Amino acid sequence: MDRCARAGLGLAALAASLGPSPPASAFTVYVSNEKGNSVSVIDTATMAVTGTWAVGRRPRGIAVSRDGKEVFVCASDDDRIDVLDAATGKVVRSLRSGPDPEQFVLDATGNPLYVANEDDSQVTIIDIEKNKVLAEIPVGVEPEGMGLSPDGKVLVNTSETTNMAHFIDTKTFQVIDNVLVDARPRFAEFTADGKLLWVSSEVGGTVSVIDVARRRVVKKITFKIAGVNDEAIQPVGIRITRDGTKAFVALGPANRIAVIDAGSYDVRKYLPVGQRVWQLAFTPDQGLLFSTNGTSNDVSVVDVAAEKVVKSIPVGLLPWGVAVSPQ
């Protein structure tokens, strides 16, 4: 065998040892570390943390602006929302949020921001350009989950203690309906066509599927994992693929992500991840799913097509929220 052939084989062996090539599109993942008072920054090309940014106390909810230039973080114990420059990681301003902001969602246009204020049973609507409160909407006790319909017309908040999904008109800022779900609802996720809303109930151990037009529960999804106590199966974060075929549900201290056939509602498999899996986020191409694992202080990376965990990435202390750059 000549020298060139031997060199080619050597390069091939090296490539194989390094594993699969990086994805064609690389994205930036942002993770809020609730007890670390920081945001970990992950590059999906290298699957490694590239930076750690200081923020306010007890960061939880996190989102990225439509242009990817700013990152919004709930600094819950400081009663504010920090706005970070995505290029530098510096806090450039803070928004008035009301007491104890936990989760939020940006309007489809990029403004306003809809915020759940856990301590005062309100949803606060903020104009992020003027840093002005547009409305304060009374909802149930301990509001947390925030979902926005694809057309931006309906906002949903879940209240943990009242056990309801509150439907809010985004033009009038009025509650137009309330739907009772199981105990301690944590997250609300619309399907891409806007026809259904999935709501996780942490203590109830279920996911309620709500018909948005009729505003009634049409299905309850339950979970059973061999060797895991039912009390440890606590549904929290939910993500549904755009094509409506798959849903992923974080199951808290069960340390699993459930993979669900979104058409039949059958649980197809459980993916073992880190400890106390909390929130989930897709990359924009939906090739990868990231989960925050609170008590193991890491992030799990799921190959969506293969339905397989492919990586674990250490981050900060008690990772809570996760968001991905739009480009």
Image (cartoon, rainbow, N blue to C red):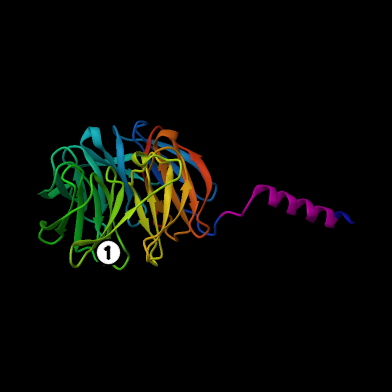
Q: Is residue 324 visible?
A: no
Query: Is 75 left or right of 22, judged from the image as shown?
Result: left
Quarter holding the N terminus is bottom right
- Residue drawn at (53%, 58%) of the image: 306
Label 1 residue SS = strand
- Nearest to the observer: residue 314 or residue 127: 314
Residue 318 screen position, x and y as percent? 38, 34
Give the quarter of the image for residue 149. Answer: bottom left
Residue under the point 54% across and 59% down:
24
**What type is the residue that disc 1 sits on?**
Leu
Judge left or right: residue 271 versus residue 38. right
Looking at the rendered image, the quarter that the C terminus falls into is bottom left
Q: At which x and y percent is residue 55?
A: 32, 35
Residue at image mark 1: 196
Rendered view: 310 above or below 154: above
Judge the density around disc 1: few (<14), some (14-19), many (≥20) Cα neighbours within 10 Å: many
Q: Is residue 132 left or right of residue 281?
A: left
Q: In this view of the protein, which residue sits in the foreground, 274 or 126?
A: 274
Q: Main secondary structure of the magenta part?
A: helix
Residue 40 in sight: yes
Say whether residue 5 is magenta: yes
Residue 327 is inside the magenta segment: no
Task: Farthest residue to the right: give it.
Answer: 1
Image-based side of 244 in relation to 196, left or right:
right
Residue 50: x and y in percent read 49, 41
Q: Point out residue 41 in the picture as x, y percentages from the top left corner.
A: 44, 42
Magenta span of residues: 4-22
**What residue appears at the point 74 percent right and 54 percent down from the top-left corner?**
12
Q: Number of labelled discs?
A: 1
